[in-house]
Image: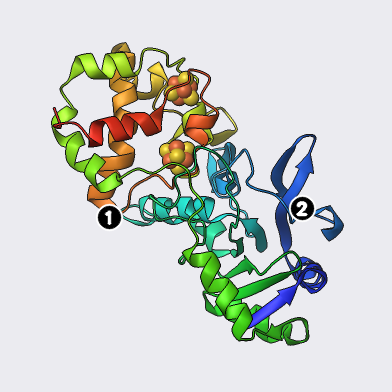
Amino acid sequence: MDKINKNDLLKLLTSLKDKNKLIAPVKAEKDIVFDYVNDVKDIVLDFTNTVKPAKEFFIPQREDILEFNNGKIKAIFSDEKRVFFGIRPCDLKGLCVMDPTFREGIEDPHYLEKRKNTVIIALACTTLCDENAFCESAKAGPVADGCFDLQLIPLGKNEYFVENGSKAGADIIDKNKQLFKKADKSDIKKMEDTKNKKINKKKVDLDLFLEKLKGRFNNKAYWKEASLTCLRCGACNYLCPSCFCNNMVDNTKKRYRCWDSCMFRGFTRQAANLIPRDELYTRFRQRLYHKYKWHKERYGVHMCTGCGRCVTYCPGLIPYIDIINEVSNSNGE
Ligand code: SF4
Ligand code: SF4
């Protein structure tokens, strides 16, 4: 088992940057965001979480996917090799939760190529990032239990325990042996303490919620009341690390796709302007049922990693955590 100190970590990232594009947390005015990095000195190591999740590097907000030229159609792919450093466990789980959607049935090569070409070095959390986070209940954090190539677990201010999760991760350690040191018994104890530490203030029971949702679907009065202050802005989808719905648009030169939101009225618009989820409450209900029931029933995982962003940044002050707890504690009607 290995550990690495901060200086050596920056040396490691510098060396990885020589052969790959490096994505890492950097400062952008008052916020911390993920971006491509040219100088590792710009990387922020001490941060809670980014406002925007990591998903935009795998499903960009707008992405050209086909090119039309004189009757010929060409697919557009990016084959750049990347190292993504600093992704938090909730955003990492967001990718794992999305993966089967893009893998099963008709594969989505645009997403899968980016996943294949990106080595992920996750950064575990030791402090609460958001009052509304419930990553422990969602089994996503504060320390990831898989889906990474390497995971760094802080051992105090200047050192990290290094967990290896794949061959790509093992290769990084092997090729940069001089930067890693052996973790001793006290390091292992600190790492285990971090894994066992509870830091969330909010708790939910997502399995109970799923159970109770079954009978709540047709309670129109409940969903109307719950969605009353929703502004249909879509922030809860755009800022969610596991929401992936997108829209396809063709022009004369290109086909591109861009993020969409199930909260938008036009999301299900069909020919002759038929909109099956025309009323807001049906779209509001859809978001919750997709996340907590249908995705779980189809793929075995909830489509929520408990990051808390949909509560913290909702301009309509929709209390999603209270909704989950209220329905869970109800008689399910
Ligand atoms: S962020 Fe809030 S207001 Fe905006 S669509 Fe979602 S629930 Fe509605
Ligand atoms: S549904 Fe809300 S809490 Fe869950 S992952 Fe998405 S933004 Fe985070």
**x and y percent of residue 192 in the render?**
52, 73
Q: In this orientation, does residue 244 appear? A: no
Q: Determine whether the residue tagged by mark 2 lies in a helix, strand or loop.
A: loop
Marks 1 and 2 sit apart, C-alpha to C-alpha, by 35 Å
Q: Quadrant of the C terminus?
A: top left
The answer to which quarter of the image holds residue 125 is bottom right
Disc 1 crowd rating (10 Å Cα; few below 14, some 14-19, many 20+) is: few
- Look at discs 1 and 2 and give the one toward the viewer: 2
**x and y percent of residue 189 in the render?**
56, 77
Which amino acid does the dot numbered 2 rest on?
Val
Q: Are marks 1 and 2 in contact (CB under 8 Å)?
A: no
Q: Along the horizontal axis of the image, is 139 left or right of 193?
A: left
Circle number at residue 219: none
Circle number at residue 300: 1
The foreground one among 100 and 333 is 333
Q: Which residue is mark 2?
A: 44
Disc 2 crowd rating (10 Å Cα; few below 14, some 14-19, many 20+) is: some
Which amino acid does the dot numbered 1 rest on?
Gly
Q: Determine whether the residue tagged by mark 1 lies in a helix, strand or loop.
A: loop
